[in-house]
Image: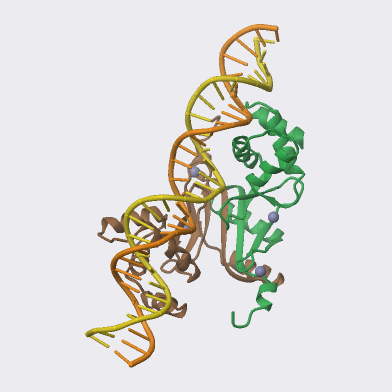
Chain colours: A green, B brown, C orange, D yellow
DNA sequence: CTGAAATTGAGATTGAATCTCAAAACGGAG
DNA sequence: CTCCGTTTTGAGATTCAATCTCAATTTCAG
């Protein structure tokens, strides 16, 4: 994993720095979604000296290398999640309470591959966000 | 169309103002995607006195009323498109040149409905973005 | 080791989006 | 139509995630 990152960095002719390693390490240890600022405070709390700039500079790199995915852009700032440990999945987001429901459908994935083939498009990654109302909110709802 | 907007606004207990009408009118007359700032300059050029604030305040309303959809958040600022005239569709976006390919698949839509039913989630809208490389960029590509 | 090139951090800067609040517009009651 | 409480608007200030600047530091090929 860490090796794969080394290779990726080297393959791009970039340097393997302590900061990039720390950032990836922290992300790997993060379950669920995170945003750059959370990551920053988490790292500082652990004694790391990484700056926000390095985090913001490293994130696009991690996306390109398929280590993380961007998710949940509903709010004001972007959220990401590690794609390595967990399996790829998409999201249903409740517009009432903000709850995030993760799901995975092989059929849905295959269908997208088909569509890309039809359009001669080389799929790299995708981002599906279904917005609606979760069962909890739907239940407790009569006349607002 | 304009009537549907009147009804929507009235139904929410809001007021039908000249500004909201102008904004919707301009959007209806817009083919393809747009961002709030474009809209602002387009309206000002036509002599309208609408402010950016009104545009930013009206957009969430238009989304809620299903008049427009948010698309393409790849760049720095959000892009939208009118959903009324054209049929709903999703997007393939080229990470090399930024080209946007629109597509529609009834199978894909139905599948999403099924998944939502399975998860007891009331789908309101969705947003699928497939990122990859378009055929044009794929062709003219040997050793960077 | 050495040195050219890449990377970093602190702080400044950007700019899309939001907020403030007095003035103006809307719309129901009469 | 007029009156009046409520909503909406616009100009400018403000926010704050994200980006940029640049001198100091780190990496790594040779
Ligand atoms: Zn909910
Ligand atoms: Zn997730
Ligand atoms: Zn392309
Ligand atoms: Zn489109």
In this rendered view, identify the residue nearer to me: C6 or B142.
C6
**Residue A108 shows in the view:** yes
Question: Measuring 49% from the left and 65% from the top, which residue is drawn there?
Answer: B88
**Horizontal side of residue B139 vs B27, given as left or right:** right
Q: Position of residue B9 (x, y in %)?
A: 43, 76
**Horizontal side of residue B103 vs A71, given as left or right:** left
Question: Measuring 76% from the left and 35% from the top, which residue is drawn there?
Answer: A2
Q: Is residue D23 above or below residue A49?
A: above
Question: Measuring 73% from the left and 40% from the top, which residue is drawn there?
Answer: A45
**Residue B87 shows in the view:** no
Q: Where is residue B94 in the image (x, y as percent from the top left)?
A: 52, 46
Q: In this view, does A144 lie above or below B71?
A: below
**Horizontal side of residue A20 vs B35, given as left or right:** right
Q: In which quarter of the image is the N terminus of chain B?
A: bottom left
Q: Quadrant of the C terminus of chain B?
A: top right
In this rendered view, identify the residue nearer to me: A85 or C8.
C8
Ligand 1 - quadrant of the structure image: bottom right
User: Number of labelled discs?
Assistant: 0
Q: Where is residue A115 in the image (x, y as percent from the top left)?
A: 58, 56
Q: In this view, does A49 lie above or below A142?
A: above
In this rendered view, identify the residue nearer to me: A58 or B118.
A58
Quadrant housing residue B53: bottom left
Q: In this view, does D12 lie above or below B10?
A: above
**Horizontal side of residue A126 vs B30, given as left or right:** right
Q: Where is residue A65 in the image (x, y as percent from the top left)?
A: 65, 39
Question: Measuring 45% from the left and 78% from the top, which residue is drawn there?
Answer: B13
Quadrant housing residue A105: bottom right
């Amino acid at each position: 994993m860490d090796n794969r990152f080394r290779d990726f960095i080297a393959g791009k002719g970039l340097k393997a720095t302590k900061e990039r390693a720390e950032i990836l390490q922290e992300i790997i240890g993060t379950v669920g979604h995170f945003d750059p600022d959370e990551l920053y405070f988490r790292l500082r709390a652990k004694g790391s000296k990484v700056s926000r700039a390095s985090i913001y500079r490293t994130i696009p790199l991690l996306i390109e290398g398929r280590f993380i995915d961007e998710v949940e852009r509903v709010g004001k700032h972007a959220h990401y999640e590690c794609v390595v440990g967990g399996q790829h999945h998409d999201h249903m987001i409740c517009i009432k309470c903000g709850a995030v429901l993760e799901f995975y459908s092989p059929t849905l994935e295959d269908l997208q591959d088909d569509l890309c083939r039809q359009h001669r498009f080389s799929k790299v990654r995708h981002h599906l966000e279904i917005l609606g109302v979760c069962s909890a909110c739907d239940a407790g709802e009569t006349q607002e």
